[in-house]
Amino acid sequence: MVDAPVDPITTAAWADLRALADGFTPDLRGWFAADPERATDLTRTAGDLHVDLSRNLVDADVLAALLALAEQVGLERHRDDMFAARRINVTEDRAVLHTALRLPPGSRLELDGTDVVPEVQEVLTRFLAFADDVREGRWRGVTGAAITTVVNIGIGGSDLGPVMAYEALKPFVREGLECRFISNLDPTDAAEKLSGLDPATTLFIVSSKTFGTLETLTNARLCRSWLLDAFRDAGVIEAGADRDAVARHFVAVSTALDKVADFGIDPANAFGFWDWVGGRSSVDSAIGLSLAIAIGPDGFREFLGGFHTMDEHFRTAPIEQNVPVLMGLLNVWYANFLGAQTHAVLPYAQSLHRFPAYLQQLTMESNGKGVRWDGSPVSTSTGEVFWGEPGTNGQHAFYQLIHQGTRLIPADFIAFATPAHPLRDGDQDVHQLFLANFLAQTQALAFGKTVDEVRAEGTPESIVPARVFTGNRPTTSIMAPALTPRVLGQLIALYEHITFTQGAIWGVDSFDQWGVELGKQLAVQIVPALGDDTDLAAHQDPATRALIAYYRKHRSS
Ligand SMILES: O=P(O)(O)OC[C@H]1O[C@](O)(CO)[C@@H](O)[C@@H]1O
């Protein structure tokens, strides 16, 4: 049994933080002036990540109280429980062992008396060998052609991780190989992603932990029909030879291998994983198969190595040096004491354009909870809204509100010293221009521009107020040498453990997601009403009835 969660608001540290927050006046200009070492003292290293926390709205007292809070709620004990395979996913009675997926071969981790590492390594070896076969043209389609396009069909964690990582690591993708990702139930997604594909050179990966997800199974059937129709039309397969075509063009990744067989995929072409891997932390399992095909087995092992580096940092670094712990505690400070409701993640790397979307599932599915893991209601707000866009696009869209709006929006900036594409505009290194914007934005957010500074520029008095920047807008700057598979693994694991830290402080089960179930059940009940004109009076609420009536009136057929 996992210990009952400590209600954070009953701790002495919470009372201290309340007192500190009362009348708290952030003063980044003053703090930096008074302490020339602030930047150095509040910068931490985790693996290849250089993390500058100095422009957060904390002084030594707040930091000390946050660290005390971590101790008083038993954060480290809870973390150790996770690494030790205790069933901390209480509502699903499961261990939480995504960290086992990235343990080096030869490690040992027992779950109910069985070492899980050999099994993890066996599946890893098998799916990486398959990835290599596809890359090297040893795996061929039913016509004998090599595979050039891989289509991952999945949703949520079975999509967001692979697509985000594929986009992030495009420079490492083997030339001549392309991955596409179908996730949405909107048929537009499948139609657009299938467009222009040659079935003879296309491999579909049906990725679903449960193999019961409506979107994924529907899209998988659409793709299977598309493939078989195309082969039949081209005379490639005879009637009755569907099985061979499906076997050469469909593989699956799932924990439910029996259902894979029911779909018609040869279990020999299926890769398993385990119920102790949450969907939102499964990109490092066989769910990452499309990525493994794209960047190759060595790249994928490097990716896993990056995760493991961050796991070890989280597991062993003292909490005052522990980057995920510190970033998680800062988020708690902003969310519970300074009133922040959202958190921006702003990568200064176009390749990370899907990273904020990935983090939305990771953070919001994990910590968007109103009860603790013992069923008692939470006593604080939980789970900020994570959002973001890559710089510099965001600068020309929503940064205005972050700089001068009335809301507190803590932001993480992520930048790399070496770009994916080192282009020049004449004499100008474009990446330097780009990085200058990252540095300028974080500086402006922290230190702003005073009335005196605005006046000194000769600004007409009437518009001085509009041109003042208050500053004290908190940011964390994360830098790394370059966006490699190893660094991406570290970044993902960093946010996994930040999310864990916040969940542990709040006492919620960060590993279930019951909140997505009700809508799924209702959709099943509503489907028949869209397909025919039966009387709606007996069921559905009046608003739903009215919308269905609108649909019936306006549908095209
Ligand atoms: O991999 P599956 O089982 O198809 O589930 C997809 C997604 O659906 C959810 O269960 C709920 O949205 C996610 O947690 C999961 O990643």
Image (tube, grey):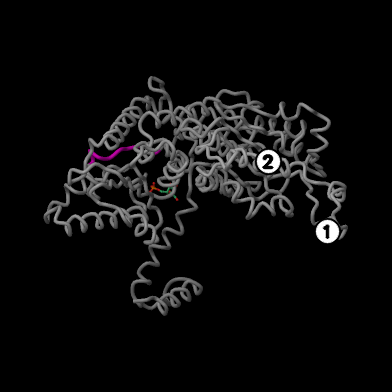
Q: Is residue 525 above or below residue 255?
A: below
Q: Is residue 475 above or below residue 370?
A: above
Mark 1, secondary structure of its residue? helix
Q: CA distance from mark 1 to mark 2?
A: 27 Å
Mark 2, secondary structure of its residue? strand
* Amino acid on which the number 2 mark rests in the picture: Thr
Q: Can you see residue 542? A: yes
Q: Can you see residue 274? A: no
Is residue 5 a member of the stretch shown in magenta? no
Q: Residue at x 67, y 29 (%)?
A: 43
Question: Which callout, 1 or 2, points at the residue further toward the start of the chain?
Answer: 1
Confirm if mark 1 falls within 8 A of ligand 1.
no
Is residue 272 a member of the stretch shown in magenta? yes
The x and y percentages for residue 372 are 57, 44
The x and y percentages for residue 166 are 42, 42
Q: Which residue is mark 2?
A: 475
* Amino acid on which the number 1 mark rests in the picture: Ile
The x and y percentages for residue 432 are 61, 38
The x and y percentages for residue 507 are 59, 40
Write the start and end of the magenta stretch as one range: 267-275
**Quarter of the image containing the C terminus?**
bottom left
Farthest residue, direction top: 106
Q: Is residue 3 above or below residue 348?
A: above
Farthest residue, direction front: 426
Left or right, residue 296 beside residue 171:
left
Q: Which residue is mark 1?
A: 463
Viewer-nearest residue: 478 or 377: 478
| Quadrant position of residue 188 | bottom left
